[in-house]
Image (cartoon, grey):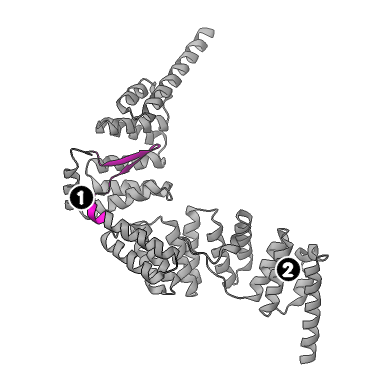
């Protein structure tokens, strides 16, 4: 029995040693040696990560059939591995199968929609699929320098080279950077001009399309904003920021069901986004769905207690400004009181009164406000309510 145990331990130790040797060569970009080391690991000891690295090693050694076999083996072990799905897409791209590459990278993005490399690969594959002749011509011109069309490896992910004419890419990037500079300085009309020039050259860049939508949005031109948000979503259906931003357009138009649908899609991608949760809460408050609104808002504040202080910034993910509503201010006060933030709770109670909240008994009897009783601000608030009550009685 002990001999069997020794054999198992030696077997396992050898597998670890070969994996370590393979990883060392992999990190040093010595891919043929890495593949050789990984191949010495018994099949039973290989996981999806090892097979993926074996696939990359063969891929970058231009042994495409062996790379495909390794990637397929990885997917048999872990069919939803976004890294492997992406790398299969890059293998198709290397083989100039651009439609297959686009379909495959979309599958990868379903699993990891916020990954920057996957976003670039989707952009590249979509361009190549829609402009096959020019893409193939560009690929042929790269046969000597980059026959595999791989731009770089980052960790366990491969990024492809965009086959758009270099001159157009460079000029589009230049206009994009100028647009960013104007946007940061709130020179929105100038930013619009630069972003439009950029997307005229490269309409596949969803990030630029989103920012063009943002500057129109900031300029209160909602139709134009929505147009470019929709175009960005066409290029990348998993673009979290765009889904949220379309939601804010629908919210501004008081199409609350449509807005809520967009926020829900965005939250499937990033469930713990305080900004999107807060936007959803604002929408639910306006729909008078108070219990759901409170739940969403509380969750947002649990993640980021200062999220309400960030309303002024647009960035790439818009946080909507909620409308003045005394009932909503009352609920915000209740939420903050429950979280122990007495100062903000009292502030929102005063805001509710400023906005015309008249259900004074609700304030006096709300259990969440009991903890505020000894606070100077709350005492003054009660004095204010007494004065308002007396004034209302005289008016009657």
Judged left or right of residue 178, residue 298 is right
Residue at the (23%, 51%) spot, across then down: 166
Q: Is residue 28 above or below residue 282?
A: above
Distance of mark 2 from mark 1, alpha carbons?
62 Å
Q: Which mark is residue 123?
A: none
Question: x, y (%) of residue 287?
Answer: 57, 72
Q: Is residue 162 above or below residue 256?
A: above
Q: How many labels does the image show?
A: 2
Q: Residue 346 carries which label?
A: 2
Judged left or right of residue 104, residue 347 is right
The C terminus sits in image quarter: bottom right
- In reply to whether residue 102 is colored magenta, the answer given is no
* Range of magenta residues: 148-169
User: Would residue 1 be seen by someone viewing this image from the given angle?
Assistant: no
Residue at the (80%, 82%) spot, across then down: 387
Question: x, y (%) of residue 56?
Answer: 33, 33
User: Would residue 362 be seen by someone viewing this image from the given angle?
Assistant: yes
Which structural element holds mark 2? Answer: helix
- Tell which residue pokes out farthest to the right in this image: 374
Q: Is residue 291 above or below residue 80?
A: below
Instruction: Name the one closer to the observer, 26 or 285.
Output: 26
User: Which of marks 1 and 2 precedes in the sequence?
Assistant: 1
Label 1 environment density (alpha carbons within 10 Å; few <14, some 14–19, many ≥20): many
């Amino acid at each position: 029995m002990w001999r069997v145990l020794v054999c198992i331990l030696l077997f396992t130790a050898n597998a670890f040693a070969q994996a370590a040797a393979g990883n060392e060569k992999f990190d040093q970009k010595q891919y043929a040696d890495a593949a050789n080391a990984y191949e010495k690991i018994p099949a039973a000891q290989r996981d999806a990560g090892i097979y993926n690295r074996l696939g990359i090693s063969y891929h970058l050694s231009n042994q495409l059939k062996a790379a495909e076999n390794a990637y397929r083996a990885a997917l048999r072990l872990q069919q939803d591995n976004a890294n492997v799905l992406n790398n299969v897409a890059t293998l198709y791209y290397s083989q100039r199968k651009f439609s297959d590459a686009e379909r495959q990278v979309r599958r990868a993005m379903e699993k990891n929609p916020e990954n920057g490399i996957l976003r670039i690969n989707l952009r590249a594959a979509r361009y190549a699929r829609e402009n096959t002749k020019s893409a193939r011509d560009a690929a042929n011109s790269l046969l000597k320098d980059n026959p595999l069309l791989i731009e770089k490896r980052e960790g366990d992910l491969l990024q492809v080279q965009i086959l758009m004419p270099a001159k157009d890419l460079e000029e589009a990037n230049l206009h994009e950077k100028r647009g960013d500079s104007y946007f940061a300085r709130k020179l929105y009309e100038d930013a619009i001009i630069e972003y439009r020039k950029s997307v005229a050259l490269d309409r596949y860049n969803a990030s630029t399309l989103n920012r063009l939508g943002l500057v129109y949005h900031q300029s209160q031109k909602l139709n134009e904003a929505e147009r470019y948000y929709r175009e960005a979503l066409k290029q990348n259906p998993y673009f979290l920021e765009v889904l949220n931003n379309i939601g804010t357009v629908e919210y501004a138009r008081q199409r609350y069901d449509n807005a809520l649908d967009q926020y829900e899609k965005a939250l499937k991608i990033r469930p713990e986004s305080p900004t999107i949760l807060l936007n959803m809460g604002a929408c639910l408050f306006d729909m008078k769905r108070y219990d759901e609104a409170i739940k969403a808002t509380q969750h947002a504040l649990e993640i980021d207690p200062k999220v309400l202080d960030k309303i002024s910034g647009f960035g790439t993910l818009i946080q909507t400004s909620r409308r003045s509503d005394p009932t909503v201010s009352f609920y915000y006060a209740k939420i903050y009181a429950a979280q122990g933030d007495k100062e903000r709770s009292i502030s929102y109670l005063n805001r509710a009164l400023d906005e015309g909240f008249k259900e004074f008994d609700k304030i006096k009897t709300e259990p969440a406000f009991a903890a505020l009783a000894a606070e100077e601000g709350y005492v003054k608030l009660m004095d204010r309510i007494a004065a308002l009550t007396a004034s209302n009685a005289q008016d009657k």
